[in-house]
Image: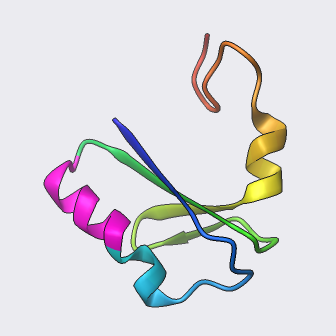
Amino acid sequence: ICAIELKGARALRPQDLRSLREFSKDYPESTAILLYGGAQPLVRDGIRCLPIDAFLRTLVPGTWPGHPS
């Protein structure tokens, strides 16, 4: 299970992670990813926070980023 949330802001605020933190509590086996408008990959509260453009560049049709096809 993977939850992905998108925020256009360049800077992250603690409240931006609220929904994914709650989701992760209910589904601890899941992966939570927040895509945002900033430039640096981060990990906050166990949530991977990735720049939107960097994430999109990793996409390959028919595969999921970070997983073998």
Q: Is residue 23 left or right of residue 50?
A: left
Residue found 74% across the figure and 47% down from its top? 55
- Magenta: main secondary structure: helix
Q: Is residue 22 left or right of residue 58?
A: left
Residue found 74% across the figure and 17% down from its top? 61
User: Which quadrant of the rendered structure holds the C terminus?
Assistant: top right
**Residue 12 x, y percent position in the rendering:** 60, 83
**Residue 49 x, y percent position in the rendering:** 59, 64
In the picture shown, does residue 10 fall above or below 50? below
Instruction: Indicate the colouring scheme.
Output: rainbow
Q: Which residues are magenta?
A: 19-28
Mark count: 0
User: Which quadrant of the rendered structure holds the N terminus?
Assistant: top left
In the picture shown, does residue 68 fall above or below 65? above
Q: Is residue 47 magenta?
A: no
Q: Is residue 24 magenta?
A: yes
Residue found 36% across the figure and 64% down from its top? 20
**Residue 4 x, y percent position in the rendering:** 49, 50
**Residue 51 x, y percent position in the rendering:** 74, 62
User: Looking at the rendering, which quadrant does residue 37 occupy?
Assistant: bottom right
Residue found 21% across the figure and 50% down from its top? 28
